[in-house]
Structures are given as C-alpha cells and as structure tokens.
Amino acid sequence: MSAYGLENFIQVTKNDPLFAAEGLDLDNGRYALNELKKSFDAIKRAWKGLLARTFFFKYPPEETACPIRFLENFIESESVRRTFLENPSYEGAKMLLRQWTKTKEAYSEGANSYKEALLALKKIEGMNENAVIHYFDSAVSFSGLIDWIDGLLANSQRVGAEIKELESVLNGLRPPLIKSLAQSLVVEAKNLPRLPPVDSGLQELLKIETSKKHIKKYETFDPIIYWLAHFDEGNVTPRRFIVSFEESNNINCKRMSLLLADDMYFLNLKRGHLLDLSNYEPLIKKGLDYWYQPATYFYTTLDVSYWADIASIVDMKRRYFAYPDLVLRQRSSLLDLLIGTAASISANFSVQIKIFSHYRKLPPLNFFYLVRVHPTLYFLPFNKSVWRIKKDPHLFGTRFTRRLYHESYYDLKKRVPLHVLKDIVETSNNRFPYFKEKLGI
C-alpha cells in the first residue's frame, strides 16, 4: 500500500474517473431502470408468433436490445465512487476498481449480445448487410452498424487497459495520466443566434402537443438552442427546443420531454409509410392524409446523443455544480430522466405491438432491433468517462428528409388549413385512447 499511490488515485477519481455521472439522481436512475426492464418484458409478452417467442427465448430483449446489467453497474459505479471520495481509503479504492471491472464486463457483454442478436436476425430475416437501414433515409448500412458495435468492443478493451493502469497508480508503480478537461458543449450563451419568431399557427399546434392530459410537467425550459443535422437534410443548423421534466401515467418514474419548437413534421400517408396502415387508422377514418410525427422521439433518428447534450445544457442552467467540468464531460447528470423517457417510449411500443398483433400485421423483428432500441443512449458513448477511444461515437441517421415522405409544417401550411392540421395533431396524439376504446387494449 502506498500513500503516494492512494493520493494519485484520489485525484484521478475526482478529475478523470471511469463510469461516472456527476450530479445523477441515483435512486431515480434505479427506478427508471426498473421501469425500462418492465417495458421490455411487456414487449416480449405482446409480440405474438412462434418466431418471436423462439427468438426472445434465445435472445432476451432485456439483454440483447438493451444492456440493462451494464446500466445497473454503471449507476453502482457512480455510487461507489461517491462513497470512496467521501472517505478515501486503500480498501475503498480496491472496491471501486472491482466495481469498474464489473461494469466494464457488463458493457462488453451487452455489446456482444446486441451484435449476436442482430447477426441472427440478418440470417433469419435476410437483411442485406450492405444496404442502408431502410427505416431511415440518411443512415449507415447494416454492416456499418455492426462496425459501430465493434467500436463499443474496442472501447471496452481500452477501458480494461485503463483499469489495470489505475491499479498500478494505486500501488504507487506509475503516475496518473489524466486526460484533457471538459470539451465544451456546442451552445455558448454569448453565441446564441437570433432565430426567427415562431409562426402563430405553429404556436397553436405546439400548444396542443404540450397539453396532454396524462402528463404532469414540473419544470420547463424554452427556448434551448442547439445545433444539429437531424432535421435539415444532414446540414448542421441551429434549432429551437422546449425541454420539460415530467411525470406520466404509463411509468412510475420521472422523464424528460424534448420538443422541436420551430417546426413540426407530418408523414404523408398517401405517399408512403413504414408500418402497416392499421397504425394510422384513427386518421384514415377521419379522412386525414397525414400523421403527426414528433421529430425528437428516440426512434426517429439513429443517434439520440443530442438529448444528453441538451439535458446537460439545461441542467447547467438550473443547478449549481461543484465540478461543472465533470458534468460537461460526462453529460449524464440527468441520465435518470433519459432512461425514464426510454422506458415510457418502450411501454408505448408494447401497446403498439398489441395493436399490430390484433390486426395480424406485426413488423419484422429487425424493426425492433434497428429502430426501437437505442444503443446511442444505452451504451453512453457521449460520456467521456465511458467512451475512452478516439473513434467518433456518433451514428447518424434520420427520417426527416423529403424522400421518406415527411413534410414540415411550413410545407403544409400553404395548402392544408390550420384547423385540419390541429385535427391531425390531436388525432395522432389520441391514438392509444382510440384503440383502447375499440380493442380494449
């Protein structure tokens, strides 16, 4: 045991730890993970058919569609780190190293499980590995997604090497190597652009979207300006967002809502759609030709790491942090709310699967594994205490291009009356009550 080694280890744990989430509500993170597990179980039970039952038996979604065990260990790692820093000791440092090792192993097991499930589906459902993932317009190919997962595995190897290095630091055999401090988020208050005012008609539609009866909002931030490429044909553009912290009837934990506030997107049902038309029955019965698609839902883009960036921007506005550089590096101070959002979306998807089962129009299983699971959230590639290699962790892919039949509010306002657009938004938002009344789901 070396006093010099312990002091160096303490400095690393403060300034450049592994698997850390400065500011995270650990208890709510555990509640959210429990809700996420329940949602995957609901999906598994709702998905009818021998193929699905056989596949989920061999590849349980709570292991293959989401690295639940990694996320549980990640939260435990942050808990052990905080305990160690409150009362540093050599034994506490050894305990933290053991927890980091468990978390690293769960990380690599989660990545391998996801990869194995995808490769099995490629064989079963005949996916072309060189074709672009067809649920998105601008996206990587299937083989590109596998390459991204291989990046997770390479990152896991690097983390394992760093854990061994930190064992040597603790034992006084080498000095610590602390990486550079925080990389700034894109948005700086002094550099905020002047965006044009929101159209009055769009304001009315946004009011409908933000007034859902089953949701209780307890904090809202508007506007939040953030640069991204998801909504502008791949061009990085400043966009305005509304951020809310919420409670919803469908899950027993808090969540975050992120709403694009300078446009809305509508799927032209006459031109094309990804899922069976039964999904849009409430609109079709009314003679409405468009489906309102909230632009920021996790399943509309492959990479949802921008949620973590925006959550960090908001959290830096609302709270004082003793170590703001760590918050900026880790982007995980509100990870509990992001997991809660994922749990809510997955719970809704389980209901959607029941609807498709009723109509015998279930999508292929690859739709679930390519669109409705969110590895760019679950493997935390935006968190610099997790992502330790130089490879770019982003995974671009979006639905919002003209080729995928989406039209913006500013496209439609020229030819669709505002009262019709309001009916489209209201009817789209009330899909589940419609099917509950019709099917008892």
Image (spheres, rainbow, N blue to C red):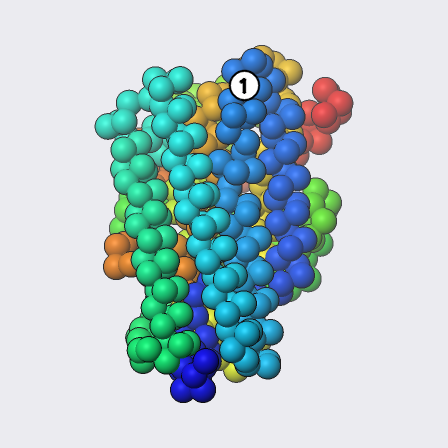
Q: Where does the image place residue 153, in percent across and percent down from the top left?
A: 34, 47
Residue positioned most to the front: 1
With 388 as the anchor, is 94 left or right in this view? right
Tell me how many marks there are. Answer: 1
Q: Position of residue 430 (x, y in %)?
A: 66, 34
Picture quadrant where residue 334 is located: bottom right
Q: Amino acid at mark 1?
A: Thr
Nearer to the camera, 30 or 355: 30
Instruction: Give the quadrant of residue 370.
Output: top left
Rendered residue at 69%/25% (across/down) = 435
Q: Out of 409 and 295, give the one closest to the viewer.
A: 295
Q: Residue at x 31, y 43 (%)?
A: 150
Secondary element under disc 1, as helix, strand or loop, is helix
Q: Is residue 33 left or right of residue 96?
A: right
Q: Which residue is mark 1?
A: 54
Asked if residue 92 lies left or right of residue 8, the reply is right
Q: Position of residue 432 (x, y in %)?
A: 67, 31
Which quarter of the figure is the C terminus placed in? top right
391 up-or-down from 178: above or below: above
Quadrant of image for the N terminus? bottom left
Identify which residue is drawn at 61% across, 30% down: 43
